[in-house]
Amino acid sequence: MAKKLLSPFRKSRGKIKDFLKRRPHRSFKKTSRREARVNLKLPGYTAFLFSVWKTIWQNKKFYLKFFLLFCGFAVVLLGVLNQESYTNFRDQLNQAEGSGSTNFGALKYVTLAVSAITSNTGLSISDGQKVVGVLMFIIGWLMIVWALRQILVGRKVRLRDALYSSGSSLVSTLAVLAVAVLQLIPLALCFVIYNALTGVGIINSGIAIENMAFWFAAALVATLTLYWWTSTFMALIIVTLPGMYPGKALRMAGDMVAGRRLQILFRLLHMAWPMLLVWVAVLVPATILDNVIQINWLPLVPFTVLLMMGLTIVWATTYVYLLYREVVENVK
């Protein structure tokens, strides 16, 4: 009887010992050389960017078909014809500049570009369409991951096969994404507390010591969120393996990045700047052209945002998957 009562505690103790063995690093304690994880021998930052682009270019037929399919579904399900909010905002800026009260200069087009991708302007979609948009991104992620897994072992991939075969891990991927959302709760609570304290006057707006203290605390919490997300990104790839469960994927991803989080995090952050440059290089000229021709029935800027969303999912998914493969090769 006593053994049965102690059995759950022994199992829990065994799991704790196994966890400590798999992750030897301890917070606020120096890790011995024998137990320290060796840094990953990854390609240089620029070389890795070129390898991602090379992979996309070598399989351009598949990516082009995927891009067209994604944009086609986005147009049908989300729509790009409603740009009333964007044109109203554009006209307000032009009126303010035309009256002579304000001279925005080049900043006007940057402001229009930013407004085109926010929730208040650009694509005016309902909550239901937002859910459909998120599902489209997830399915697109799964399709590219499935295709890359086949491509890198030398198999020929068809878009039809990727569409029908990649959805088996949809539920598991949603579970990992739910964990990613939960990891955002501390950061969200920071802003809820900030708004509450600002509303009652405890924290004053502008440059004040309490304001600076809040943003310092928010930066620390954001760093913690990025710390968690480093393994979550890897888990989003691992969970697509056949027969993989979300809990096991998160555990494997945590073991994979243990002692190497900063190295992998810097790689993930490095993924963003090429796409930011492309967004600026494409979207700002689109806002300038739209402001010159001013054809309100032509959704030029919203359609450009839609195209850039398709390019972003192609780049981000390929980058993260190839980074995962590099990490796996080094961990072995």
Image (cartoon, rainbow, N blue to C red):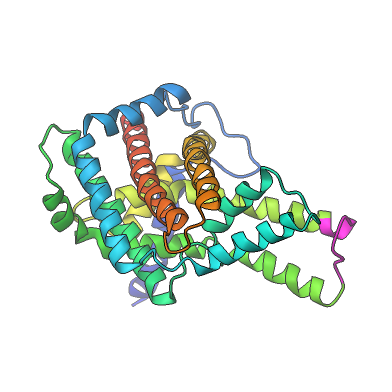
Place of residue 18 in the rendered image (x, y in percent of width and height, measured from the top left): 40, 49
Viewer-closest of 110 and 1? 110
Q: Is residue 59 left or right of residue 198?
A: left
Tell me what residue is drawn at x 37 percent, y 41 percent: 315
Q: Is residue 275 above or below residue 89?
A: above
Left or right side of 262 for 41? left
Locate residue 184 relative to residue 257 in the image: left or right: right
| Residue 141 appears in the picture as rendered | yes
Residue 286, horizontal then vertical, whole percent: 49, 46
Q: Position of residue 39 (x, y in %)?
A: 47, 27
**Residue placed furthest toward the right:** 208
Confirm whether the magenta stretch covers residue 22: no
106 vs 246, nearest the viewer: 106
Residue at 53% over, 35% down: 266
Whether residue 239 can be seen here: no
Query: Where residue 79 appears, x then y in whole percent?
Result: 36, 66
> Which image quadrant: the N terminus?
bottom left
Could you tell me what secondary structure mostly forms the magenta stretch?
loop
Q: Quadrant of residue 43?
A: top left
Within the image, what quadrant is residue 215 found in?
bottom right
- Above or below: residue 39 compared with residue 68: above
Residue at horizontal 61 percent and vertical 45 percent from the top: 27
User: Where are the magenta residues, as a range?
Assistant: 202-211
Q: Is residue 310 left or right of residue 157?
A: right
